[in-house]
Image: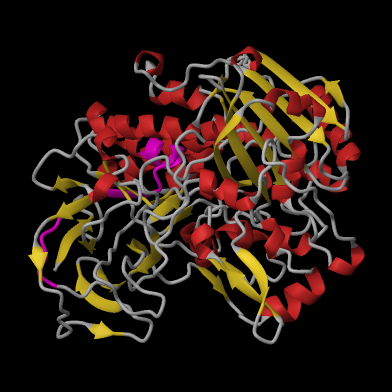
Amino acid sequence: MHRFLSISSKSTSLKNRKQLHLPFVSLVSPATPEGQSCFHYFDQKPPSLGTRLGFGRVFSSGYFPNRVNLKEHERYENGFLRLKGFAGEIRSYSSEIDRESIEYDVVVVGAGPAGLSAAIRLKQLCQEKKADLSVCVVEKGAEVGAHVLSGNVFEPRALDELFPQWKDEEAPVNVPVSCDKFLFLTKNRAISLPSPFDNEGNYVISLSQLVRWMGVKAEELGVEIYPGFAASEILYDEDNKVVGIGTNDMGVTKDGSKKENFQRGRITLLAEGCRGSLSQKIMKEYKLREKVQAQHQTYALGIKEVWEIDENKHKPGTVLHTLGWPLDSKTYGGSFLYHMKDRQISIGLVVALNYHNPFLNPYEEFQKLKHHPSIKCLLEGGTVIQYGARTLNEGGFQSVPYPVFPGGAIIGCSAGFLNVPKIKGTHTAMKSGMLAAEATFDTLHEGSNMEAYWDALRNSWVWEELHRARNYRPAFEYGLLPGLALSALEHYVLKGKSPFTLKHGKPDHEATNVAKLHSPIEYPKPDGVLSFDMPTSLHRSNTNHNHDQLVHLRLRDPNIPETVNLPEYAGPESRYCPARVYEYVPDEKNQLKLQINAQNCLHCKACDIKDPKQNIEWTVPEGGGGPGYSVM
């Protein structure tokens, strides 16, 4: 038996009414204690976010027999069913006809800082202008914040605008930066440099905890939040306008047969985070980069641990950034170490994914970092609480695409608003979500259009900030020392007002050299005290996927790993992945074959970015799978 929810656009201001049906079933999260579930009935007030976390939920709006009525539908080879609906002909997976429905004016994909800021701002505007717009947020993580990872030294500028009284509302932003250090590391030394980060007035936070708080505030305003739903497909009408999304099949086994449960969804605002899979499709479909002559996006991989250290060593608010060792002079990146509250510190290494040496292993470089004398002394006697990894945008101003498409907009890190020299993107992601919300409100309520989002973005402090920071990242295309020199010129002399704009180098996947140009790197074995093997770290990420599902990591050509990647690049996917998803193992003929351990995936997206031939496509797994971050 299936349970159905229908999401549709109800505003009479819209040119076309849109409807999408979602069959919902009982979902029990891996974190659910004793298989209990928290029920959310549509005729009742939804429970608070705090009561949802860690629980699977049933969304019930009626029961329907598990059968398909095809009389009024056309089936296509790709599996879509064409429905006659409010928006004309809509390509959809849905096949049931008579269903109870709940209508939403705006559906946001992604309960991160951008998506929640957009949802919150929409509801605030409704209160201010006495309007009634319904807002829904779908999130692929098992709970809000489960997939959110960041440094994070937080600049509260956007939060000040969104919630001017946030200090009185128990926001988890309570450790002000007290000390700001910048070091250049050699193998055994640490050389102090002037700190360019200007962190006065900023805070050391856990971003996963902040978005949980934002989720509660959103629900208090009337936003509906549905964790555990992974948006995987875009729906278009006959005019090639986006009219929604489909969520991943919950219940397709490895052999492709249907299991008992499956779900669908819709969308107008894409807030998926860095390298969002739907955002990538939309940018390609509508040529959004070409529309504004934006360059390709550049990326980095951030690997992070949260430690609990000795109280005598803990100095809340202390911030440390480093350049140099353990990375070579041609690889852009650096480390961070932030003192949080409760004797906790976050430590991590960020490695730009345009590195050349295919033998470089970002995870192992991070393990080496922790043995540096200036860091080792702090960690000794401590314990690791959590581990995780995520890619981040580094393209900045040059790489921002046109963020509006027919039927919606791209916000936050899906578009790429990270300020590289600040090493901050949360405040800009939040602001982009707020600006998109204002444009969305005017479109639905005032009859405006979404192009206003693009205009507002270019007239905002986000654009000004990114423009001033535009030359820092591409300066390091020339190496570490030239990059430092050009960055110092930009920061201290030109102050972001240089008369030129530097261009990025090759896309990250093209930057990888063939193996014969480099020598293998011998990494030390982990000691189990400061450095750890991969299985130990993965356990600390709380990563979990249903094993009996289609592999969400797709090879466009299954022959490329053995015919190209292994002989030419020495199998780099076995090293750039921070979760050992990819391994070359001998078959019965002792020939090395690529094995994909999809259940290990941290959803970092490095494989989608760095594979030399762009042969790996990262797609969303079943909703609720992936890491389970709580303090990242």
Viewer-nearest residue: 184 or 130: 184
Where does the magenta region start and end?
97-118
80 drawn magenta = no
Vertical order, 378 against 504 (above or below): above
Coloration mode = secondary structure
Q: Find residue 492 and report its image quarter.
A: top right
Q: Quadrant of the N terminus?
A: bottom left
> At x 32% / y 51%, what residue is drawn?
29
Describe residue 298's horizontal placement relative to residue 117 as left or right.
right
x, y (%) of residue 431? 48, 33
Residue drawn at the location 14% of the way across and 55% of the way down: 60
Could you say which is closer to the camera, residue 52 or residue 120? Answer: 52
Residue 414 x/y as whole percent: 52, 50
Residue 103 in sight from this viewpoint = no
Residue shown at the point (84%, 68%) measured from the top left: 514
Residue 181 appears in view: yes
Camera-side residue of 18 and 593: 593
